[in-house]
Amino acid sequence: MVAFKDYAQYDATGLAELIKKKAVKPDEVLDAALERVEKSNPKLNAVTHRMDDEARATLKRGVAKGPFAGVPFLLKDLYALYKGQPVTNGSRFWKGYVADHDITLVERYKAAGLVVIGRTNTPELGLTMTTEPVALGPCRNPWNLARSSGGSSGGSAAAVAMRMVPMAHATDGGGSIRIPAANCGLVGLKPTRARNPQGPDVGEGWAGMATAHCVSISVRDCAALLDATHGPAPGDPYCAPPPERPFLKEVGAPAGSLRIGLVTAGPDGAKPHKDCVAGAKDAAKLCEELGHRVEETEFKFDKALFQRAVWIVIAANAANTLALRAKAAGHEAGPNDVEPLTLAAAKRGRETPSSDYAWAVLTLHGFGRQVAKMYEKFDVLLSPVLNNPPLPLGRCSMQTPDTETFGKELANELPFTPIYNVSGCPAISLPLYWNKEKLPIGVQFGAGFGNEAVLLRLAAQLEQARPWKDRKPPGI
């Protein structure tokens, strides 16, 4: 029998194997997860809604015999509807809202045997790169409590880093899986556009920029969960190219000798913090040692034009989201309902001509084609995830009505992640580097549209060469 204290030593696949072999009971695993939430969450504020009773009822009913049967899991508190449970989207405006159905992705999580134990902290409507909503309070980074865990999946990343669960649901519209993975020392894959379904209520998020998957301890968990969830659902407007074989089979498969482009400057030529550059260069050196060919290259595009087009799409979606909620709530959103940035973004969205929205989508597609051309020369692009190490809490705050200044600050902090949302290409953050302050510095690897396979093969190779699983924040 595995000792209760050993829970935090296992990834999700490892826990599932123990349960399958009857080396440990599902309720013992659940108890261990809830105990870790009880112990670690008060200082982090990563889990904002607990579902202990629902989780126990799920085990009593019997979980599906999927690849993660009996494994505890957390859902991000952003549009991830779970029937009978509240969802706030990080906002006071959704107080009291309870879902009357599961979204398709949650249905697939249940079919995989996952046991949902709660919801994780997120900024309001997922609009920024840090997780400090007025409605839920700030989420703190387990590596340094004065720092941000990232956003918008900051609660999920903080919870996994502290081993409350081995992996958790996360979403990404501009870097929101990769940013918190980088800040918290985890694996974070943003899949190809439409790899995972967004239905039944949504066909696409943010004009195709948004997608969902997870943050995890291991590459194999990332791959196995994608096997359990990917593929179109009835009514989806489009789908990603089907994989040649299960994603899990890519873990441990030969990576070959890849052509890797190293990017260490933003699209305007600005250099990130020295620690972020050092992390990318260190990863490039490791790739060369593993037999890959690395060549320096650059992302070169009009940053101001890119930012303008992205924010037209985001503002229009903020306006629509608040309008839909206002209809259900019976009143328009005001300053006591949502944060200043959200109100201002929605106002901007309402006042922007529909022709500008069409222009923005067309423009963003153009940037996507620029990225596609880079993959004619390279198999993989390597860069920092972020412009800086984990930021102090209070930066990129949504307590401003100035969307223009806020957008510029966000663009300066995120020179490398949004281009993959715009292009729809997959990208993964890997925890390969820590700075002198013992803060994790994520390294990003991107691939061509539909090519998660090459990222998973390379990620598994890097994980084997430089294991990170036993690298944990203080207090574990």
Image (cartoon, helix red, strand yellow):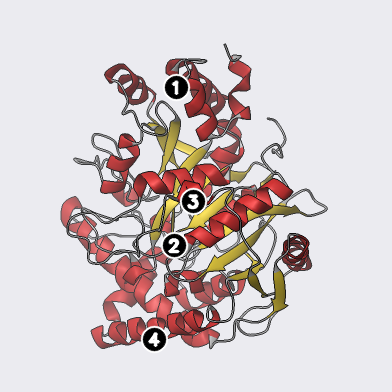
Which residue reaches farthest right? 436
Q: Residue 475's spot in the image, x, y percent?
A: 70, 31
Q: Residues within 10 Å of mark 1 (few under 14, many from 20)?
A: some
Pointer 2 and pointer 3: residues touching (CB < 8 Å)?
no
Q: Residues within 10 Å of mark 4 (few under 14, many from 20)?
A: some
Up/down of 357 relative to 179, above or below: below
* Mark toward the start of the polypeptide (4 vs 3): 3
Find the distance from the CA under tag 1 to the CA under tag 2: 40 Å
Q: Quadrant of the N terminus?
A: top right
Question: Image point 50% across, 16% down: which residue?
Answer: 24
Question: Image point 42% across, 70% down: which residue?
Answer: 424
Pointer 3 and pointer 1: residues touching (CB < 8 Å)?
no
Q: Quadrant of the C terminus?
A: top right
Question: In the rendered structure, which amino acid carries the disc numbered 3?
Answer: Ser
Q: Give whichever of 22, 384 is nearer the camera.
A: 22
Find the distance from the CA under tag 4 to the CA under tag 3: 27 Å
Pointer 2 and pointer 4: residues touching (CB < 8 Å)?
no
Comparing marks 1 and 2, which lies closer to the viewer?
1
Question: In the rendered structure, which amino acid carries the disc numbered 1?
Answer: Lys
Res. 150 visible in picture: no
| Residue assigned mark 3 | 153
Q: Residue 18's spot in the image, x, y percent?
A: 51, 22
* Mark toward the start of the polypeptide (2 vs 4): 2
| Residue assigned mark 2 | 127
Q: Is residue 359 left or right of residue 354?
A: right
Find the distance from the CA under tag 2 to the CA under tag 4: 21 Å
| Residue assigned mark 4 | 363
Up/down of 166 relative to 194, above or below: above
| Residue assigned mark 1 | 20
Find the distance from the CA under tag 3 to the CA under tag 1: 30 Å
Pointer 1 and pointer 4: residues touching (CB < 8 Å)?
no
* Mark toward the start of the polypeptide (1 vs 2): 1
